[in-house]
Image: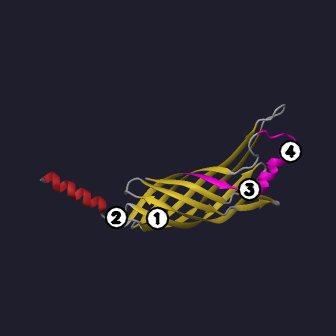
Amino acid sequence: MVMLVCTSLIANSQNEMKPFRFYVSPSIHIGFFSPDEVNTYIENALSSYELTFGTTDLIMNYNVGLGFGFRFFNLAELQTVTEYSIAPKSFVVTNGDNMSFTFSKFTAGLMANFMIPLTSNERKTSAIIGAGILYHNMSFEDYKATKIAPRFQAGISLNNNKFNPQILISYDMAKADDNGFELDYSGIRIGANLNF
């Protein structure tokens, strides 16, 4: 009997709505973009070689990050963002030196998300709609540029109040230039925030 009462109390405490929660949020995303001037630069650098397979264009980038979250009543949250993105490209050149290019980006900023419960138990599954302002520091070859720009995102939050993965699709507007050379990291990202 005592064991049954204790189990019931623990279950009730776990289901009780908490007004505030802090969590650590590692993240991993894959991005899709089309940096026209960067791609033209790579194409020109390889113009004297014959490409036998694939394309010279950068079309994908890879993102890893670490942030912190502050959630209020499981209905709204603020997330800090610190991310590193990289888009590498390597070429094997016959009778010449192999060539490689890297377009990278460091990002930091703040996102605000609103949670829309999709189940009767609102701590379990919610839709996410969010936006924020981010600082981007982009680099390619000898070109560097910075930009403060928005990010918009939407997705699903699977919340059990301990481990809370969020599956997200987001859009970055990150375009700047260095002496007329355009560095454009704008594009769509798909991935997950793994909140602990």
Q: Does the magenta stretch include residue 33?
A: yes
Q: Is 12 positioned to the left or the right of 124 in the image?
A: left
Tag 4's secondary structure? Answer: loop
Residue at image coords 50%, 56%: 167
Which residue is identified by label 2?
Answer: 121
Mark 4, other Cα within 10 Å: few <14 / some 14–19 / many ≥20 = few
Q: Is 55 positioned to the left or the right of 76 in the image?
A: right
Q: Which of 119 and 87 is in front in this view?
A: 119
Residue at image coords 82%, 32%: 94
Q: Which amino acid does label 2 sit on?
A: Asn
Magenta range is 28-52
Tag 3's secondary structure? Answer: loop
User: Quick one: label 3 or label 1, which is nearer the N terminus?
Assistant: 3
> How many angstroms separate mark 3 from mark 4 (CA)?
18 Å
> How many angstroms separate mark 3 from mark 2 (CA)?
43 Å
Residue 47 tag number: 4
Residue at image coords 30%, 64%: 16
User: Quick one: label 4 or label 2, which is nearer the N terminus?
Assistant: 4
> How many angstroms separate mark 4 from mark 1 (CA)?
47 Å
> How many angstroms separate mark 3 from mark 1 (CA)?
31 Å
User: Quick one: label 2 or label 1, which is nearer the N terminus?
Assistant: 2
